[in-house]
Amino acid sequence: MNFDGRLRCLILNESSADAIYFEQRFKKSEHKLFAFERCTLQDLGAKRDSHSAQLALVYLDGYEISALEDIFKKLPTIVVSAPGDDESVLSAIAAGAQDFLVQGQFGAETFVRTARHVILQQRLERERTAIEEQFLASQKLESIGRLAGGVAHDFNNLLTVIINYSQMALNKLPAQDPMYKKIDAILQCGNRAAQLTRQLLAFSRQQVLKLQRMELNSVVMSIEPMLKRVIGEDIEQIFHLEPGLSEIQADPNQILQAIMNIVVNARDAMPNGGKLTIETSTVELDEPYSIKHVDVRPGKYAMLAVSDTGVGMDKNMIAHIFEPFFTTKEFGKGTGLGLSAVYGIVKQSGGHLWVYSEPGHGTVFKIYFPIVVKDEAVRANQNDSVRNESDKTILVVEDEEVVREVACEIIRKLGYQVVEASNAEDALKICEQGMGRIDLVLTDLVMPRMSGPELAKRLGEKHPQLGIIYMSGYSNETAEHHGITDKNAMFVQKPFMPKTLLFAIQQVLNAKSA
């Protein structure tokens, strides 16, 4: 903050004679960069605006170093020592002072040069600390994301069994059967659990996204009719959307979900009403900005901002809001996964997320999506005509026995012949012994000893006509990390339903017979 157009410097000195002498010499010089304000340590404690100064010049004579440590932490500080008092200087530097001058041996020129160096040094140190904190927070969320993705993968294996067997049992029971309602409750809970795992996968950036070129304004406007029902009558809605906003590449449904998650958070932060503002604009994040913000590349972005006038958050809360299961809501009123999902959706879409909040002053979420410059539209799946050919044989390769049994039962009910293998080695043997009757391989992505992609590669060397479908509790976004090089490879995410599996099988078989 400037002080009458100049930088404000506090001169801390118990005996004002030295400080007055220096200030008079400075005023006679040509330097007009600083405005000085003399005070004692006791006076400083009563000054509420002391933090707005840019520099402190502290005369050590008469002070204990320990009494100055708070000043050293708050302001860039130059200490002034008596000639030969090296011990005090060393103690002050160790306690946090940035530089020193010797009393009676410096003039305006030396002071200005030292002051500029000290102010710049602390500014660089603060920027370095901020970048380190961002990096550590990013690494922490990355580690939590890997853990969350692994947990979601294992749960998806279990849910594949729970959901499909529950559905099969319901299909065989009349609605009036006493067990029907209980099994239906199991199915509903399984579906709710699947939704939770999808949110975990969203946070860990391992969910399936249907990327396409889209207009951010269109998604924002699509939620306007439902906002009043979500946030209530006592919250005012304000929209500021930039006309002609450039397109981004993302999954519209997931972007919609991210916006709604933030809106619900904003609603809960305004129990007595307030204002919710949603705005979009084109911004350019330059090189200096990218240096200060981890994982940000310079360039043009479509910015989405959602702000509220709610209770706000302190710095400690902001540091944890994207962690899974972190919530400030009452027990039973939130899963703690809403903002975690927002974080994952934005990052998986190549975007950048920034949050600013203060207690009592509301919160602002700003999301930056890279603008699509070239024609990078993602090719959509073609809904080819489907043929259910019961003479086709499918080899199911899955190391989890219960998951393998469910998959085999579903495929049999769909009208296909099934052969099963518990690992890749057995699958290779089966194919070598009866290759003429295997039309398609449905294999788990990650298995002990040999992965699904490695199995597909071995089979493809001798039998290039063989169809391959991968299944996993992870998403196809992680497939390439497990060795899948074919961008068009068919992928089914667990827990899958029979119609999803049928569509994948028919797509592959139709493509092979075309």
Image: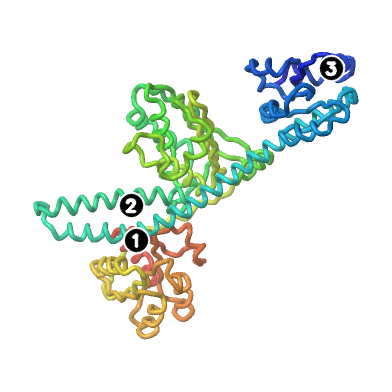
Of the residues shown, which amino acid type is indicated by label 3? Asp
Of the residues shown, which amino acid type is indicated by label 2? Ala
The residue positioned farthest toward the bottom in the image shown: 433
Quickly name the residue at label 1: 157
Of the residues shown, which amino acid type is indicated by label 1? Asn
Give me the C-alpha separation between circle 3 and circle 2.
73 Å
Residue at the image position 51 percent from the left and 31 percent from the top:
314
| Front-most of residues 419 and 80 | 80
Label total for image? 3
**Mark linked to residue 18:** 3
Q: Are marks 3 and 2 in contact (CB under 8 Å)?
A: no
| Front-most of residues 370 and 40 | 40
Give me the C-alpha separation between circle 2 and circle 1.
10 Å
Residue at the image position 85 percent from the left and 18 percent from the top:
22
Q: Are marks 2 and 1 in contact (CB under 8 Å)?
A: no
Q: Crowding near pointer 1: few (<14 within 10 Å), some, many (20+)?
A: many
Measuring from the top left, give residue 380's x and y in whole percent. 44, 55
Reply above or below: 494 against 293. Answer: below
Quickly name the residue at label 2: 194
Give the mark, 2 or 1, whose residue is nearer the N terminus.
1
| Front-most of residues 386 and 414 | 414
Q: Secondary structure at mark 3?
A: helix
Give the mark, 3 or 1, whose residue is nearer the N terminus.
3
Q: Crowding near pointer 3: few (<14 within 10 Å), some, many (20+)?
A: few
Give the mark, 3 or 2, whose residue is nearer the N terminus.
3
3 vs 1, front mark: 3
Residue 439 appears in the figure: yes
